[in-house]
Image (spheres, grey):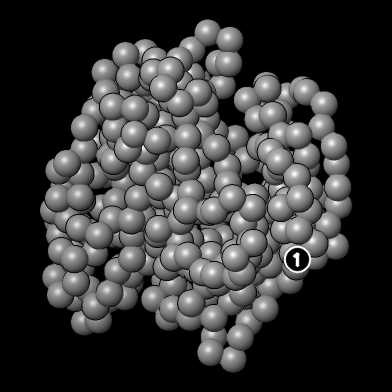
Amino acid sequence: MESFTFARAADAREAIALASSRSETRYLGGGTNLVDLMRETIERPRTLIDVTGLANEIAVRGDGAVVIGAAVTNTALAEHRHIRTLYPVLSRAILAGASAQIRNMATVGGNLLQRTRCYYFYDNEAAACNKRAPGSGCDARDGFNRIHAILGASPACVATHPSDMCVALSALDAIVHVDGPNGPRTIPMTDFHRLPEDRPDIETMLETGELITAIELPAAAIARRSTYRKVRDRASYAFALVSVAAAIDVQDGVVADVRLALGGVAHKPWRAHQVERLLVGQPATHAAFRVAAEAELADAVPLRDNAFKIELARRTIAATLADLVP
């Protein structure tokens, strides 16, 4: 780890002012990913700005929406009664990720900024990685690529996004509240993360100096019947090979509405729009779910070691939706 200076901000405006007055800064929440990256010298900030003192409340608005402060811990969010009852997909997604100790430290804002677990991204000594060093190449494309992307990848990068929580937030149409040198704004969760294209090092729509201040969950009755299924190599403490966040509303045996997002398959949480378009108005049957899943994966492009993910994603989509049908 290289030396850095440290500052603690009392509120969002102070944090933004501190970031604006210094170069190469990073905001520090729980530090569960950033500190590891600093130890590996992949992240080399000259200043860390502690933002753990920012809003850490979960507020339910009059219109039913929920506003989650960026400094809320993953544990607090997963255990919140309102979230467990009305947004079970979010609670289950968080509890499917990491260990209890890490969830106790990790913050909601920081979770959105997790960086990939691609082996080549972490190999700072020998591997080429366009995400870590733009223009250096991508050793993952011809290397061991079992965990890598099958959707939305580019010649520059085949890494996947690691967060479970973000997959659920994508399915729920969450809204990211940010503040920065040019004032506050909001970003739809489905647009917050970028596909790699030719600049995989640029991972989100955040501008320089912008800070995540809150996540908003719109009121969504469909979320009451929702769940998260994560397929991984072992029962605990592993990142998803494929995951599915799903919510469905079935009326008289017909799909009235459905939300679905995938994890472990792309550079960002993958909102399954094909599944949603094809299923509305169709019988809520396993066969219909399977047809929709096949359409969603029609454009999937496997690498040498991860073709199994395509069929795994099809089966996981169909099985997860079938389990939600009353």
Which residue corresponds to the image point at 19% horizontal and 72% vertical from the top-left?
280
Location of the N terminus (image quadrant):
top right
State whether residue 155 is above or below residue 191.
above
Displayed quadrant of residue 292: bottom left
Query: Residue 73's spot in the image, x, y percent?
Result: 72, 57
Displayed quadrant of residue 16: bottom right
Observer-nearest residue: 196 or 251?
196
Query: Residue 106's spot in the image, x, y percent?
Result: 70, 48
State whether residue 287 is above or below residue 3.
below
Observer-nearest residue: 255 or 103?
103
| Residue ranking furthest to the front | 21
Which residue corresponds to the image point at 74% horizontal and 64% vertical from the top-left?
12
Q: Name the side, left or right, on which 45 lies relative to 321.
A: right
Secondary structure, mark 1, is helix
State whether residue 56 is above or below residue 150.
below
Which residue corresponds to the image point at 24% horizontal and 78% vertical from the top-left?
256
Observer-nearest residue: 294 or 326?
294
Residue 85 seen: no
The amino acid at mark 1 is Arg
User: What is the tally of numbered marks visible in this picture?
Assistant: 1
Q: Name the side, left or right, on which 203 lies relative to 156.
A: right
Which residue corresponds to the image point at 15% horizontal and 60% vertical from the top-left?
288
Q: Name the side, left or right, on which 17 lies relative to 64.
A: right
State whether residue 164 is above or below residue 324.
above
Query: Residue 247's spot in the image, x, y percent?
Result: 37, 66
Residue 129 seen: yes
For mark 1, does the 10 Å Cα neighbourhood hold few (<14), some (14 to 19), or many (20 or more) residues?
Answer: some
Location of the C terminus (image quadrant):
bottom left
Q: Which residue is mark 1?
A: 13
Query: Residue 228's spot in the image, x, y percent?
Result: 45, 55
